């Protein structure tokens, strides 16, 4: 038969195990938002990846994705999606949107893969509400276009 303090120890151990299972499930996500957020900008500069501006906010969209977005809607740089696995960063996707009266709305997404070091670019031009054109661009061409959007 268990004594009173043994029963308390068993109950406390059970509570610890339950709480720690939740903590270990949440820990990588909270760590990744903190670590791969603004404090990781120095690594982004070294890898020619757009940094997260100081005013941006984060939102964990799932266990493996973190979305960073600007507080104002008039920015050309619309968002940064960071893909993680556990405590490791896999890739980042930066999305830019620009509209003018001549070419309509255009969108460029640049995905930077940390494992391979490669960057892939998607470019869309929305000619009207139903039609869109996708052009293949390399990273240097995308940077050149983005420089004109500012």
Image: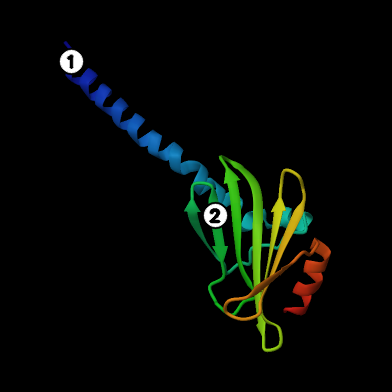
The spot of residue 33 in percent (x, y) is 54, 52
Q: Which circle marks residue 94 in the picture?
A: none
Q: Is residue 21 left or right of residue 47?
A: left
Question: Of helix, strand and loop, which one carries label 1?
Answer: loop
Tell me the number on the disc at residue 66.
Answer: 2
Question: Where is 16 relative to 102, above or below?
Answer: above
Disc on the earlier residue, 1 or 2: 1
Residue 36 position in % (x across, y down): 61, 51
For mark 1, what is the residue? Answer: 3
Residue 17 appears in which quarter of the rendering? top left
How crowded pointer 2 is (Cα within 10 Å; few <14, some 14-19, many 20+) is rated as many
Task: Identify the residue at image location x=65%, y=55%.
Answer: 92
Q: Residue at left 64%, top 66%?
A: 95
Residue placed furthest toward the top: 1
Viewer-side residue, 23 vs 88:
88
Eyeballing the image, is 70 above or below 103?
A: above
Please identify the quarter of the rendering in which residue 56 is found: bottom right
Judged by depth in the image, the label closer to the viewer, 1 or 2, is 2
Q: Position of residue 78 (x, y in %)?
A: 60, 70
Q: Is residue 1 left or right of residue 137?
A: left
* Image quadrant where one finds the N terminus: top left
In the rendered view, tell whether residue 60 sits above or below residue 23: below
Q: Residue at x 75, y 73 (%)?
A: 146
The residue shown at (35%, 36%) is 19
The x and y percentages for residue 141 are 82, 68
Q: Nearer the viewer, residue 56 or 76?
A: 76
Q: Mark 2 falls on what kind of element?
A: strand
Q: CA distance from mark 1 to mark 2?
A: 48 Å
Residue furthest to the bottom? 101
Residue 68 lies, with reference to residue 9, above or below; the image says: below
Q: Residue furthest front?
A: 130
């Amino acid at each position: 038969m268990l004594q009173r303090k043994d029963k308390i120890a068993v109950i406390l151990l059970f509570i610890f195990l339950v709480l720690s299972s939740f903590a270990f499930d949440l820990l990588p996500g909270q760590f990744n938002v903190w670590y791969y957020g603004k404090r990781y900008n120095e690594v982004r500069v070294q890898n020619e990846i757009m940094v997260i501006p100081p005013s941006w906010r984060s939102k964990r969209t799932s266990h493996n994705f973190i979305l960073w977005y600007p507080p104002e809607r008039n920015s050309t740089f619309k968002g940064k999606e960071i893909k993680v696995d556990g405590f490791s960063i896999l890739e980042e996707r930066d999305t830019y949107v620009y509209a003018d009266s001549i070419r309509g709305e255009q969108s460029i997404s640049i995905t930077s893969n940390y494992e391979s070091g490669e960057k892939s670019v998607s470019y869309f031009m929305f000619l009207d509400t139903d039609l869109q054109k996708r052009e293949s661009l390399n990273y240097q061409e995308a940077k050149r276009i983005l420089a004109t959007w500012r």
